[in-house]
Image (tube, grey):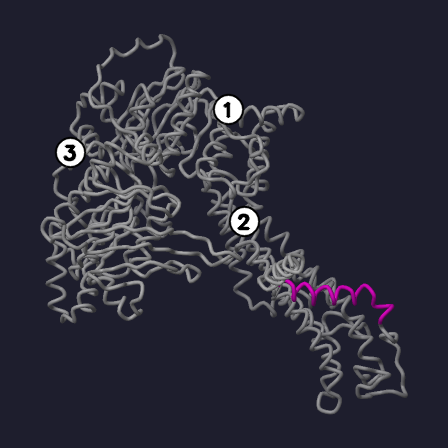
Amino acid sequence: MSAPATRLSLTSGLSRWLGEHLSLVIGAGILGFFVLMAIAAPLVAPYDPVAQMADVRLQPPSLAHPFGTDNFGRDILSRVIWGTRVDLQIAFIGVAFPFVIGTLLGTVAGFFGGLVDTVFMRIIDIILAFPFLVLMLSIIAILGPGLASFYIAMALVGWVSYARLVRAQILVLKNSDYAVAAVSLGFSRTRIMFRHLLPNAIAGSLVFVMSDAVLVLLNGAAISYLGLGVQPPTAEWGIMVAEGQPFVTTAWWITLFPGLSIVFLAFAFSLLGDALGDLLGVHE
Amino acid sequence: MTAPLLSIRDLVVDFHGGPEPRRLIDHVSVDLAKGEILGLVGESGSGKSLLCRAVMGLLPSRRLSVDGGSVLLEGRDLVRASAAEMLSVRGSEIGMIFQNPTSHLDPVMKIGEQIAEGIRFHEGASGREARAAAVEMLARVGFPDPSRQYDNYPHEFSGGMRQRAMIAAALSCRPKILIADEPTTALDVTIQAQILELLLDLRESLGLSVILITHDLGIVAQTCDRIAVMRGGRLVEQGPKRQVLAAPKHDYTRMLIGSHPSLPAHEEVKPAAAHSQGRPLLEVDDLHVRFDVGGSFLRFGGRKQVSAVKGVSLQVMEGDTVGIVGESGSGKSTLARAILGLTPLSSGHVTFDGVDLARQPGKALAKLRRETAMVFQDPLNALNPRFTVAETLGEVLRVNGMPAADIPRRIDELLDLVHLGREFAGRKPRSLSGGQCQRVGIARALAVNPRLIIADECVAALDVTIQKQIVDLFAELKARMNLTLLFIAHDLAIVRNLCERVLVMYHGEVVEEGPSAEVFARPQKSYTAALIGAVPDIDPDKKLLAPRSDPAPAAA
């Protein structure tokens, strides 16, 4: 009698945990799926993503081509799978540089205050005064199209949000008793900044990283769509949407499947951000 | 005896979060007679606030529910009353005031309107009538110029006046019962005495029944008729005040009474021990600390300065225990921070072990950082939440150059010193109680082998029994390690019991100084006398001396 009862309570405990962390489970599940696809792309993609097959142009979804083919006769499913590699890379690198730069500058500005703070804050104001895309496009136009330019532009523009978030936290935390205690115990400034304040200030930024990844992903797609990011014939979701645009009424599958992939990946990041916020207690 | 006005019978409140409901209020029964003041005593987490919220039908979470018992208000069961019925009970039959008047008053609404609002809602009075009633109420709770002050906003008043306004709002619809949840905890002693006096007056003039929730037995002894002691959701003892205080039946009540810091009645004033001759460890000479307030870079000349410390001088010998007392805003904490070099000095000198902080700031700061330590008021906020106890202590030792191999042994030693089990080394602050956090804070201060420890209100945030343990710990460390201690507190009784010498500060100045026994037995200044007289004593026969000065004028 007792064995089924304990199993029941165990499974109910697990299901309660899953229920409470539903967004974490689903978000991590979708992201994990995309990461697996990216890693296993050569194995799971049925065709070469750039191979053009003149005899099967603009085929609707079928058993041979589950997602159909585009106007060059390339297999959409294979291109979506290979595109995962590029798009995950865009989301990751596009967020990593702004996050690191912004967090460091925000910590320094908040901790030292005074002139340092004023200078950084005014620079941020100037950057924020321009529309985000306009700034991105002009930087990429100067550097020349390509993914490297996109990453540099992201790093130059994207750090401001992280700097502001972290600075605000540091301003609060540097007056907390444990920071004062650290000063009174003779700890060095570097130690106080990076061992005591930063780890406590960073939770908000970590959550923002997730929602920012969504924006970066969409930006990357937009830049590629405009022809300034990833160059054809590389398989990338943004370009695929752009390439399918002339055929959207006759061959909807060219745009639909890469579009859906963007939506799902963005959805996963949003869910993860939400879950991370709950776990780190940011919403409290 | 007539039927009680309010009768709580076997009340049960459960928390439905985990697999099993957790019982937070466990079959509590208590009565309140008309015109009676009932003191509800207990430490944080004992369920005293929750009990009153259950009576009001204001449980703070959806996961809490009343799962048994009844609350009878003149025969009507409030537990079974509908939400609409409770609306008319709250405010017009039972009023409530809270600990922190600042956060319970609407900051963008005129103070008079916050009082008139209830009158309009419950009694359907017209705007003019409500205003007249509110003005009358303001006058009753001690506003000197009620018709003008009706139009002031909460931030224009002091904490004491705000609490008066809250009382006026709670009483505006003439409820029969007032529930006061720690109404004076956030206030200075002299203001506390005035508010308690006001509650007693109102009981007389309005025939009000009051449930006074407090952790301070002194307040209960001075104001209440009956006492109910709560612990862990249960009522452990209740009875008439004198009976409970004089002959407590329950061990816990005895411990509470034993922990209450009281000023000794009369004591033979021993001639102060001859001060050890020689150079003082710490010498403060004519210290001024000023802060810039207001004035932005667009408004030239608009810069104002506020003096937090005005010409303070003091000497502390090696091994001395000096208490600094004073009300909030008297500059005690600023003085402490200035001594440790955490706040820049405006003028004057701080000399620690012969090195002058103003003349040789570099050398003095290095010395202060190595040889002094501070213990803070909020024990949880004083510890880095991400560090375990061992990491917190270990870091201090490492920064001070202790070889890594010796650190674990020293951490064990420190934990032993503050009577924390060694198993606490791996815990983080969040999993510790307030008292345990404070012990870690003290261990961290001791880690540097300091010659001077400054404790800034370090027991103010703790329950009385924990307070006593921490004060005892300081006394023990003082005896064992010849610690030099600067103990800042607003609680006079604690300072009286712990410190040999005391400084009384008022508005940034030292108004009185001397051996504690002497200062407390024969205060020379009226301010000191008022401060001492306002401490509620646990002996109900030692009357509270509320300073009968007029309430501070509004609008600064």
Instruction: Identify which amino acid the numbered label 2 is placed on.
Output: Ala
- Identify the magenta region: A24-44
Residue B325 highlighted magenta (yes or no): no
Q: Is residue A222 visible?
A: no
Q: Which mark is residue B417?
A: 1
Query: Which chain contains the residue that carries disc 3?
Result: B
Magenta run includes residue A30: yes
What secondary structure is the stretch in magenta mostly built from? Answer: helix
Identify the residue under disc 2: A201
Query: Nearer the N terminus, badge 1 or badge 3?
Result: 1
Question: Residue farthest to the front?
Answer: A1
Whole-percent x and y of residue B246? 23, 32
Residue B520 x %, y %: 22, 23
Q: Nearer the viewer, residue B260 or A55?
A: B260
Give me the disc on residue B294: none
Give, as a three-letter code, the residue at label 3.
Answer: Lys
Q: Chain of mark 2?
A: A
The part of the image, by quadrant, that contains residue A89 is bottom right
Q: Cα distance, mark 1 to mark 3? A: 40 Å
Which chain is mark 1 on? B
Residue denoted by label 3: B543
Name the residue rendered at 72%, 71% in the picture: A228
Residue B339 placed where, x, y %? 39, 27
Judged from the image, the secondary structure of the residue bearing numbered disc 2 is: helix
Above or below, comparing residue B524 to residue A219 in the picture = above
Q: Nearer the viewer, residue A5 or A41?
A: A5
Which type of secondary structure does the marked residue at label 1 adopt? helix
Q: Amino acid at mark 1?
A: Leu
Q: Residues within 10 Å of mark 1 (few under 14, many from 20)?
A: some
